[in-house]
Image (tube, helix red, strand yellow):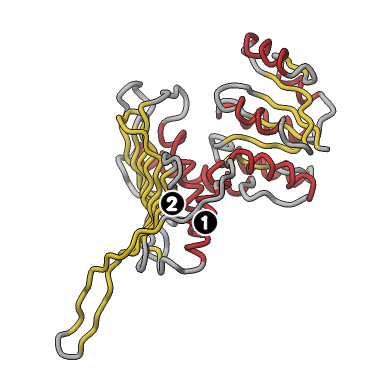
Amino acid sequence: MVKVGQIGLGDWGKNLFRNFISIPDCDMEICSDLNQKAMDNYKQLFPGVKFTSDWMDVLKTDIDAVIIATPPEDHYPMGKEALEKGKHVFIEKPITLTSHEAQELIDLSKQNDKILMVGYILLYHPALKLLKRYIDQNDLGKVYYFYATRLNLGKVRTVENALWSFASHDISMILYLSGKYPKMVSATGASYIQGNIEDVSFLTMFFSDDLIAHIHTSWLDPHKTRKLTVVGERKMMVFDDTQPSEKIRVYDKGVDRLEYETFGEYLSLRSGDIYVPKIEAVEPLKSECLHFIKSIQNGTQPLSDGKSGYDVVRILEAAQKSMESNGTPIEV
């Protein structure tokens, strides 16, 4: 049995709590939040769990691991304190707001022989696992480019911008699917609601083998869009997370090169069937939480470990620098 505590029961924290407390091998012992009214409600529903307004109380408890679901600016100090106290740490994305802080958490986890996992939920989505299998089996042929859109008319952040808040999901997916790391990034954005917080961003990542990836994020958009498109030489795939059932579509479309001795080389457009593969009905967040518990029990590195979180933050830092320089390409 893995004894855990949680810091943060806000919009996303309550979902993590719901999943962790339902895992048979997980014993939720203590939670912390600054919203007293919310904690009073939790106390009535979960009398076996202790609730406190002081997050340090969580770390003083005899627990094995801590879940940190707080605003990003709190991730580093809370994660550092937890690792120094010998706790395994699950921390929501982004792992920290600087790569230096992320590296420090990674070093602490190694020094204390503790699991450090970052909450990139989409890496545990069954649709993404299927997409990864298609790419690894070369069903799409050579992957030409990725294109992601993450848009909404939603909650406006006051610390991190749309790039940091939204694009980290898509960056993590693209790194996972491609198995590659970009050599350079370029980004542009604009602030409309607050003077120094970008509400919209456009990020392009350049890889060493002509692969490119483009990510558009905004919380000032009339559409709620969560879509990733993969264009390959033989087939194309679209992962649309807003669809209730048909989350993956495979398009048998492409451009064939036909060579003739007399007439030279010709290009032929090919448009075949559209295939909707069956996706297993598994809640990604449930899989993510269970993966953390199993990683602790088995002593294995999680899929979204500290290094993966560090890689995303490095790209975000370079993208932010590029955005502040009007799109000047920045090496990663």
The residue depicted at 42 percent of the width and 39 percent of the height is 242
In the image, farthest residue toward the left: 263
User: Where is mark 1, residue-wise?
Assistant: 130
User: Where is mark 2, residue-wise?
Assistant: 248
Q: Is residue 310 visible?
A: no
Q: Quadrant of the N terminus?
A: top right
Q: How many marks?
A: 2
The residue depicted at 39 percent of the width and 52 percent of the height is 238
Q: Is residue 290 visible?
A: yes
**Residue 52, position as x, y percentages in the image:** 73, 15
308 lies left or right of 134:
right
215 lies left or right of 89:
left
Q: Quadrant of residue 36?
A: top right
Secondary structure at numbered mark 1 = helix
Mark 1 residue type: Leu
Badge 2 vs badge 1, beta-carbon distance below 8 Å: yes
Q: Quadrant of residue 224?
A: top left
